[in-house]
Image: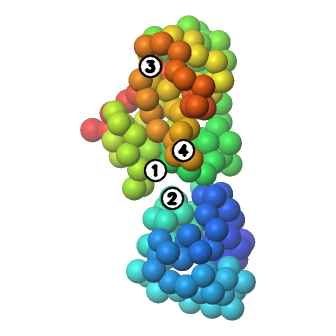
Amino acid sequence: MQPLGARIKELRLRAELNKAELAREIGVSDVTISYWESGAIKQIGHERLVALADALNCSLSTLLEGDSHSALPVLTHKGELPWKQINASPIEVSGSFLPVKIAWQFPAYMATPGTNTYFAPLRTGDLVLLGPTQVFHQPGHYLVSEDGQRELKYFNTLPDSELTLHAILLCHWQAT
């Protein structure tokens, strides 16, 4: 199993945070982050571990045990896109039982909103089926990047060129 310090560094890089940014989010110094990542400090208190997992947009079990379990890819405002995550598996939509309203002929990916994220109309625990695309197909909710942040936006017509389209929301299941 990978040491905790190496997992912290890997998750920090995946979240696209530098040491100073992560330190600010948790309330420690960037030197402390360096010590955690190098293994110089081996014991981290529970409150700090919870804050660290929240700041890295991962579960506490992922922080402590790694990605060995198969969890759903997570939809976050920064970091890896759901289909680029280690646990991402494509779903063939064409001819499937899924209630997709768009004729989608390519693989799609199931994901769930990450902790401390807000992707209206999604809520924590919802499931989404995303179709990665760089092409605007028709009206719908799209995962877009603007000003370094990702969010869902609804478009009736082609958006302006300042946005990066990542995916269309093909299907949405609400948590009960």
Residue 132 - label: none
The vertical placement of 166 against 106, above or below, is below
**Residue 50 seen by the camera:** yes
Picture coordinates of residue 127, whole percent (x, y): 43, 36
Comparing labels 4 and 2, the label whose residue is closer to the camera? 4
Quadrant location of the C terminus in the rendered image: top left
At x 56% / y 38%, what residue is drawn? 145
Residue at point 69% right, 91% down? 40
Q: Residue 114 carries which label?
A: 1
Query: On the image, which quarter does residue 38 sit in?
Result: bottom right
Mark positioned earlier in the residue sequence (4 or 2): 2
Which numbered disc, 1 or 4, marks the residue that appears first in the sequence?
Answer: 1
For label 3, the residue is: 155
Q: Are the residues tagged 1 and 2 within 8 Å (C-beta)?
A: yes
Determine whether, in the image, residue 121 is placed left or right of residue 87: left
The residues tagged by marks 4 and 3 sit, at their Cα atoms, a distance apart of 18 Å
Looking at marks 3 and 2 on the same chain, the residue that comes earlier in the sequence is marked by 2
Quickly name the residue at label 2.
57
Q: Earlier in the sequence, mark 1 or mark 2?
A: 2
Q: Which residue is label 4 attached to?
A: 147
Residue type at numbered disc 2: Asn
Work out which quarter of the rendered image holds the N terminus and state it: bottom right
Q: Which of marks 4 and 3 is nearer the N terminus?
A: 4
Q: Distance between the residues labelled 3 and 1?
A: 23 Å
Which three-letter amino acid code belongs to the residue tagged 3? Phe
Q: Can residue 11 be seen in this view?
A: no
What residue sits 68% from the left and 70% below the top? 9
Q: Which class describes the residues within 10 Å of circle 3: few (<14), some (14-19), or many (20+)? A: few
**What secondary structure is marked by label 2?**
loop
Instruction: Identify the residue shown where x is 52% and y is 32%.
Output: 143
Local crowd size for mark 2, using a 10 Å CA cut-off: few (<14), some (14–19), many (≥20): many
Which amino acid type is marked by label 4? Asp
